[in-house]
Image (tube, coloured by chain):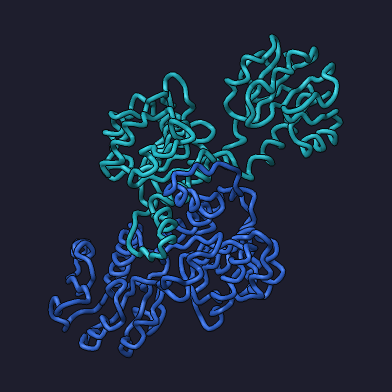
Chain colours: A cyan, B blue
Amino acid sequence: VRVWVPYDDFATELRALGAQADVYTGMGSDPATVDDVEILVAPYMLPGETLAVAARMPKLRIIQMLTAGYEQAMPYLPDGVTLCNARGVHDASTAELTIGLVIASLRGIDRFARAQLSQQWLHGPRPALADKTVLILGFGSVGKAIEKRLVPFETSIIRVARSARPDENVHGRDELDLLLPAADVVIVTTPLTEETAGMVDAAFLARMKDGALFVNVARGGVAVTDALVAELESGRLSAALDVTDPEPLPADHPLWRAPGTLISPHVGGNSSAFLPRAKRLIVSQVRRFIAGEQVENVVAGPRWPH
Amino acid sequence: VRVWVPYDDFATELRALGAQADVYTGMGSDPATVDDVEILVAPYMLPGETLAVAARMPKLRIIQMLTAGYEQAMPYLPDGVTLCNARGVHDASTAELTIGLVIASLRGIDRFARAQLSQQWLHGPRPALADKTVLILGFGSVGKAIEKRLVPFETSIIRVARSARPDENVHGRDELDLLLPAADVVIVTTPLTEETAGMVDAAFLARMKDGALFVNVARGGVAVTDALVAELESGRLSAALDVTDPEPLPADHPLWRAPGTLISPHVGGNSSAFLPRAKRLIVSQVRRFIAGEQVENVVAGPRWPH
């Protein structure tokens, strides 16, 4: 099997499996013949156009993404080719950032970091994560990874997903009106879809209890920014946001200076945890391909093998 | 039994057990007769002199601290009275702050918080906690609480205590020279004793690997500040410090502006997690006293009951 991958290190590992592996970074000319490429791994964090090369690959079977999202690949997916996403690859990175944002916001680490600039020792009591009720909205791969890390922190956890799954103790989104007032911390991890766009609106935020913390590690568009800014400026809620709408947040946007707001610049998945986990996925997929086993994470096109 | 406690809420709970409970805050006059007080709970975060009243209590059996440290109580402990500390009460609070400091420092949350002031979006890759080797130096109550919270974060953990406990997979401090170079993160949680004062000196820091993170949630005096400042100013190590020497850190101290340094103002135990856990300990101790069972956490004086 010939595979195109975006990193040298991946290619080395795949050759050890017996694959022919070429490094395709998405920039510059073709690394080798396109004639017998069967698996194309999409370059990370580059636009969908880097997949236009797929149209010239007569034997292509699989396009493998390195992101959970795959909308950008759809226009370039040839008929009959299988598209796989990277579900799970970013979980560890995103989940640990989420826990870090929650603790930083509650315990005041962001304030302490800013107070260092003026050399101020801001001693005083702060809310702890311990004993808090944390609502996780979006109980997929990232939501579960967040919960797994939260468990030892002596919190109560409320799981909410699109539809209730009573056997997993997961509530449905239609129960949010009743559940939101119980939560001290609300963490949103849903994908951005037509259904979730603007889901965190003024009414949603109004159901949250006074002093609660809103955490967005999903997509900025899941929340209505103006409604969020209004609650933050009133001082009723606080927020920790790895994603915003718009993004990047322009200078002079009111979110930057809203009280009780901690903003990280969409770095949930952008850490040293990414490459080892991405490599494990690619190696596993190519091994399955060689062995004739079903590849995982199929999100469009036929299953492979058919 | 008559008990003096520093909070109304504790007194209410103890009365429900059948105790006579008076609120003694350590300030102002005696709340009631001292003649039949058997248990005195030390006011929190006040000097040892608040325990001078013990000398006027002829039936006193137990002084109960709300801190792990108890040195400040020793001059006021009457002969034959049992002294108990609050081992465990601060674990949840200190351990969660520790995890927060580690993630904040590695993932750059402190930098993002400062960048908010200038409205800068600092997107870019950062080290993750996942895949790191974390050395916990001091494997008592707090060290174990930190480990318990670290476990789901996909790290490797090295346990080090004063003496090796091979059955618990704990290394002895005499092995540090070999262990330090393997750690990406070194967390110190030891008590401050003659043995540990200045333990983190230039030689200790020199054994840490390039780019490693030093975390102190023990006491400032466990580290030699000048040696730490030198490593931080060189940029070879970074640090997250909840404690410093001196403390509070004076304005213009070089630690405030050392690169890669995150400072929180000794707030490990100072959170909403404290009161509920302190109350559970006091209720448990008074219940044991009433039932004639051994009280826990005896650190000086005779066991009770004798």
Asked whether residue B242 is in view, the answer is yes
Residue A258 on image: x %, y %: 34, 43
Residue A180 on image: x %, y %: 31, 35
Q: Residue at x 32, y 86 (%)?
A: B77
Asked whether residue A290 is in view, the answer is no
- Check the picture and name the quadrant holding the N terminus of chain A: top right
Label tally: 0
Side of B35 relative to A63 (left or right): left
Q: Nearer the viewer, residue A276 or A284?
A: A276
Residue B280 on image: x %, y %: 32, 61
Q: Nearer the viewer, residue B251 or B191?
A: B251
Q: Quadrant of residue A123?
A: bottom left
Q: Residue at x 43, y 51 (%)?
A: A103
Side of A51 relative to A234 (left or right): right
Q: Is residue A262 above or below residue A31?
A: below
**In the current view of this chain or complex, which residue is farthest to the bottom?**
B79
Side of A158 relative to A14 (left or right): left
- Check the picture and name the quadrant holding the C terminus of chain A: top right
Side of A61 relative to B102 (left or right): right
Q: Quadrant of residue A201?
A: top left
Residue B269 on image: x %, y %: 39, 64
